[in-house]
Image: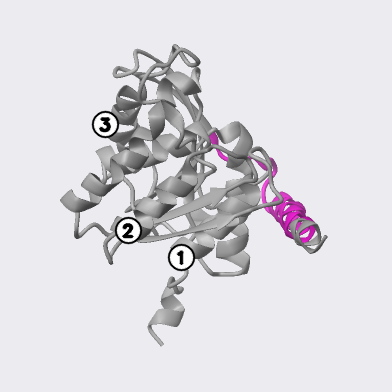
Amino acid sequence: MKLKNKALIEFGLIFIFFITFSVCQAQQIKDFVIGDKVSFESKILNEKEIIVVIPPYNYRDNPNEKYPVVYVLDPGNNLIATYGIVNFYSFVSKIMPKMIVVGIVNKDRERDFLPTKSEEYPTGGGADKFLNFIDSELTHYIDSIYPTEPYRCLIGHSAGGLFAIYTLINRPKLFNSFICIDPSMWYDDQSYVKRLPDFFKNNKDIKKSLFISISNEKDMGIFPFINELEKNAPKGFEWDYIHFKNETHNTLGFKSICSGFEMIFKNWKPISDSIK
C-alpha cells in the first residue's frame, strides 16, 4: 500500500507541474506547444525518420547556455514521462541539469533494437544499422540544430533496454549514461550477458553510469547480468539497480526514469552552488 501511495504522489506531482507549467506559459505566449516534430531522410536506414525534440522551455532566452541530451527509445511510452521528470527535477527540485529530450520513433522496433534475428522475431537483426543511424546522423543533426553540450543519456525499455546495453558494448563512447528499464537480457541465449566480462576486460578505464530496473516479470535474464556487473565492473563504471517487485514489465517506466536520473546525477550540483 505504501508503494502504491508513493506512486500516486509522484504521479500527482508531475501532473500538477504540467498543469502549472502550461498555465504559466499560456500567460506569456499565444500558443503553447511542447517540442518540435522533425522528419528527415536517413541515408543509412533508407527511410524517412521521425523524431520529437523537446528543449528546455526557455532555452532561447539563454543563448549562451548548452544542455545535455537524453535520447528516449519507445517515445510513445516514455517520452512525456521523461520530459516531465527532467523538468521537475531540474527546474523545481534542482537535482539534475536541464536537458534536451529527444524521442526516436521506430517503424519496426524489433528490427531496430534486436542485434540478431530469431524465429520469434524474424525482422530482428538491424541493431547495428540503427546504431549507425544514431551515431552518424541523428546525434550530428541534434548537435547542429540545438545548443548541446557533449553529454548524452540513453533510455530504453525492454528490447530498447537491450539495445542500450548493445550500444554500451559496441559504441561505448557514444553515450555517457544509460537507463535500462527491464531490459530483455534473455534474448539470443543471453549473449550480451556473456559478452560483459570481455567488454570490461578491454575497457578497464571506462567511466559511464548505468541504471537498471527490474519488474516482477520472470526470465528476463537481468539477474545474471547483475552478477556479471558485480564481478567485473571496474571502479570508474558507476551502476545500480532496483527491483520493483510490485511493478509489471509495462508499469515500471515512470519509477525507473525517476530512480535512474537520481542515481546518475547523485553528485550533480547547480553551477551557482558549486562555486560557493
Give the residue number, with chain letter if any, for mark 3. Answer: 136
Q: If you read the primary sequence from the N terminus, does the residue marked by circle 2 or circle 3 appear first?
A: 3
Q: Position of residue 240 (x, y in %)?
A: 46, 60
Tag 2 secondary structure? helix
Label 1 amino acid?
Phe
Labels 3 and 1 touching (C-beta < 8 A): no
Neighbours of disc 3 within 10 Å: few (<14), some (14-19), many (20+): few
Label 2 amino acid?
Lys
Quadrant hosting residue 168? top left
At x 41%, y 88%, the residue is 276
Tag 1 secondary structure? loop
Alpha-carbon span between mark 2 and mark 3: 33 Å
At x 36%, y 21%, the residue is 116
Q: If you read the primary sequence from the N terminus, does the residue marked by circle 1 or circle 2 appear first?
A: 2
Labels 1 and 2 touching (C-beta < 8 A): no
Neighbours of disc 2 within 10 Å: few (<14), some (14-19), many (20+): few
Look at the image and tell me whether residue 96 can be seen.
Answer: yes
Give the residue number, with chain letter if any, for mark 1. Answer: 265
Give the residue number, with chain letter if any, for mark 2. Answer: 231
Q: Is residue 264 above or below residue 269?
A: above
Q: Main secondary structure of the magenta part?
A: helix
Q: Position of residue 30 (x, y in %)?
A: 70, 43
Q: What is the number of the mark on residue 126?
A: none
Closer to the camera, 98 or 247? Answer: 247
Look at the image and tell me whether residue 142 can be seen.
Answer: no
Label 3 amino acid?
Ser
Magenta segment boundaries in residue numbering? 8-36
